[in-house]
Image (cartoon, grey):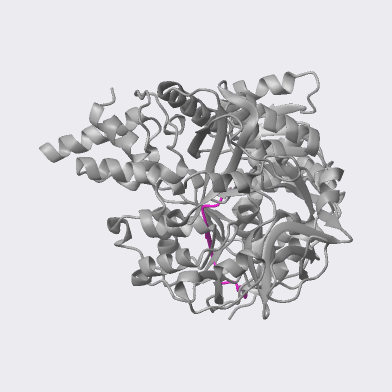
Amino acid sequence: MISAELKATILAAINLDDWEIDDDTLASEVPGWDSLNHVSVIAAVEERFGVLFSIPDVVALRKIGDLQRLLDSKLQGKGT
Amino acid sequence: MSHIQNDICTTMWNRWLRNAERQPTQDAIIHWRVDGAPFRWTFAALMDAAEICAANLMENGIERGEVCALILRHHPWFYPLYLGCVRIGVIPAILAYPNPRLHPDKFRQGLKGMSERSGLDWILTERDLEPMIQELVEGKASTIKGVHYPLEWDSQHAPGTETITKLNMMHDRISSSDPLLLQHSSGTTGLQKPVLLSHVAVQEHIDRYAAALGLDNRDKIASWLPLYHDMGLIAAFHLPLALGIPSVQISPFEWVMAPSILLDAVTKERATISWLPNFALDMMADKIRDEDLKDIQLDSWKRIINCSEPVRYESHQKFQRRLHPFGLSPSSLSTCYAMAETTFAVTQSRPGAPPPVLAVRRTELSRGSVAITTDERETKFCVSSGMPISGCEVRIVDDEGHDLPEGRVGEFAIRSASMFDGYRNYPEKTAEVLRDGWYYSGDLGFKHGADYFVVGRKKDIIIVAGNNIYPEDVESAIGAVRGVIPGRVVAFGQERPEAGTEQLCVIAETEITDSIGQKHLKMDILKAGMAIDVTIARVYLVAPRFLIKSSAGKLSRSANKEKVPM
């Protein structure tokens, strides 16, 4: 499940009021989240949550659920 | 300096074979991977693998002169498959793998249009696309004979003597003037214009362009460019293979997600040359994190060639500032003006020196003349796209095709030794642009001294991140959205200086006036754009009869653009 915080960060990064986002949503299914904006969305998530994703991790992302899981694992790592 | 030995061979296959015989263990293609070591094809191994692919193509009934669409993602076996097509005279046409957001009907429509125009015979793709494609192949009017999934073919077993004899016989029937490849002049799916290029035309062009660039056999290309684009296909793929120098091929899909991959590849492989559209300079300057630059060393990168989008001075400045601390030479940025219709390059800036920049008065330029200025408030910096390469002639002409003097803005008309003969099965489009041996490009610019400067376009094409978008396609898609008054839509490009490219905007008339209804309509318009694989950055909903027409009676994009707040 996509957290409200992650969803809000994504929508703010692409300047979108609202959009239904779930685990299986692809970035390309969200208006405004295109290849030009992808780096900005990832950077916004990194900044908001104070984490840093590696390049292989970013490239391996397929669905927004993958991003949530990657974020969760980073946050868990920070907490321990 | 070690010069490259250029000599035109009867076929491109023979030229690759010659390179493989001269330097069998030299890297030909370094297939980049972000999650591990790259896959390295030497010239000899690549040719052996291509022979296997050629045998598979032949055994599947694919014949000389037939057009094969290659729709595959970044994969090490893509290259031998392409070479295998050339081996037996099959004409490869690389198409973009569909973005998930592209509506399947739109994808099929593009393929259908291509099959009607280009005479598409076969589709070589991945199993994932089977559900989308099969319906098209089974359609009554389809010219497509079948679909194959080459990544599932046996790639282990070298063909036997009998098969090799057959392959040789097929190859022997190819002449130098036969088509080597089919590339599409950039355009959105419905308007792709197919260009056939022969074995000799591509080789001659590569040799002329290599001379303009001053390449030698120590050069190494690094590229993330998609191979369905002429810049990726001719400059970053065919050119190194024909010259016998290595190229690093990076997935475009991965590069947009992490632009530092290119810098990493240049650093690790000591690459010397890359071609990039303008937006890529901005993206790398702005979006790469400091931590991804810590091991970057760019002193080998002697030429970064800005091409395929209007060259922006500010993008060059920004890129230099960001990467100079990592060894980027001030003279490394250069420029090129190119198009599929002339195989690739028309002009190229001088090797080893930054392209000349002119500070001109913006208002004068918009009126069609060039006035040098020192008044910064009025200045537009124009970057030279260089001088014509050998075999190319350029004229700047007015609307009637008469030559304009230096310093006047007009259309680029080009005559080139590597010119196309016309769009395949598209005589009406050919007649529009090809007259008396001159190609009328639709690009606007001027000459100053020996240099040519591109400043705009005659037609309303919108270029977003190197992709040409025809406003007609967008207007047609948005005009079909419920709530939009049919036929009352204009699409146009808006400069996005901070990104070094344009963004797509739409004005649509509607009778919906309540804010919730308008919000839903805007969302539907964005979705309709996504279904044709374009991102609409701004939607302006306006009342009926807001849009004005030009004197020709059509909705005016430029006049209506002026009517909305930017």
Residue at 22% in and 41% down: A48
Whether B224 is among the magenta residues is: yes
Q: What stretch is highlighted in magenta?
A: B214-226
- Pick the residue in front: B218 or B273: B273
Q: Main secondary structure of the magenta part?
A: loop
Q: Residue at the location (42% across, 33% down)?
A: A27
Closer to us: B103 or B525:
B525
Measured as percent of width and height from the top left, residue B331 is found at 49, 76
Quarter location, residue B120 = top right
The answer to whether residue B429 is seen in the rendering is yes
- Residue B130 drawn at (x, y percent): 61, 24
- Whether residue B360 appears in magenta in the rendering, the answer is no
Q: How far from the left and from the top, in percent, is residue B16?
A: 69, 58
Quadrant housing residue A32: top left
Q: What residue sits 40% from the left and 33% below the top? A: A62
Image quarter of residue B75: top right
Name the residue at the front extreme. B545
**B339 left or right of B500 in image:** right
Q: Quadrant of the N terminus of chain B?
A: bottom right
Residue B297 in the image: above or below residue B81: below
Q: Can residue B35 be seen in this view?
A: no
Quick check: B220 above or below B39?
below
